Amino acid sequence: MLAATAVNTAVFSTLLFNRNLLQTSTKLLVNQNNLKIASVRNLAAESAARNLEHDKLFKRIDLELRGHDPEVLSSYTTFVSNVCDHLEIEKSQVTETPHLKWLLTTLKDKFAKKKYKVQYETITSNSTANSSPQSLQ
């Protein structure tokens, strides 16, 4: 009975020691987290101060969109226009250039007769858009 009591008190004192150690380690973790949060806040303030100075990466952006389907091309043009509006970039008028037509006539097989031909046709539509140099500052 005396040995069991000694073991229980030893376990109890070990538990108390571990609890105190756990409490001090959580306090240290909390302090470290506060330091991390404070340092992150300082970095955010510094980066916000740096962002006030505008970067000038490009003077002018020219986009040329090409596609085989005019409806898809108009959809892309609308998307690019909306992106420019959202980013407050001035854009010029979108111009559509004449489409390019490519036609190729070949034989169906290497050894086929002249009357067995296949025609391949591709029509490519183009549109271009420019940004003004003043808007990208």
Image: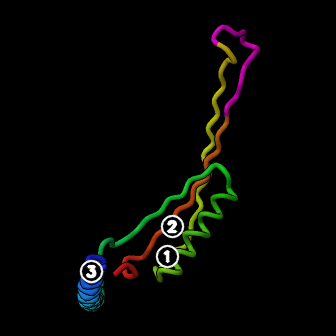
Residue 23 horizontal/vertical position (percent): 28, 89
Tell me the magenta residue range.
110-120
Tag 3 or tag 2, which sits nearer the N-term? 3
Please give the label number shown on residue 129: 2
Q: Is residue 44 left or right of residue 87?
A: left
Q: Is residue 3 placed above or below 129 in the rendered structure? A: below
Cα gap from disc 2 to disc 3, whole angstroms: 92 Å
Q: Around disc 2, counting alpha carbons within 10 Å, would you say few (fewer than 14), some (14 to 19), or many (20 or more)?
A: some
* Residue 93 drawn above or below residue 111: below
Residue 22 in the image: state x and y as whole percent: 28, 84
Left or right: 105, with 132 as reference point: right
CB within 8 Å, label 1 to label 2: yes
Residue to which mark 1 is pinned? 91
CA gap between label 1 and label 2 equals 7 Å
Q: Which residue in the structure is indicated by mark 3?
A: 2
Indicate the amino acid at tag 2.
Ala
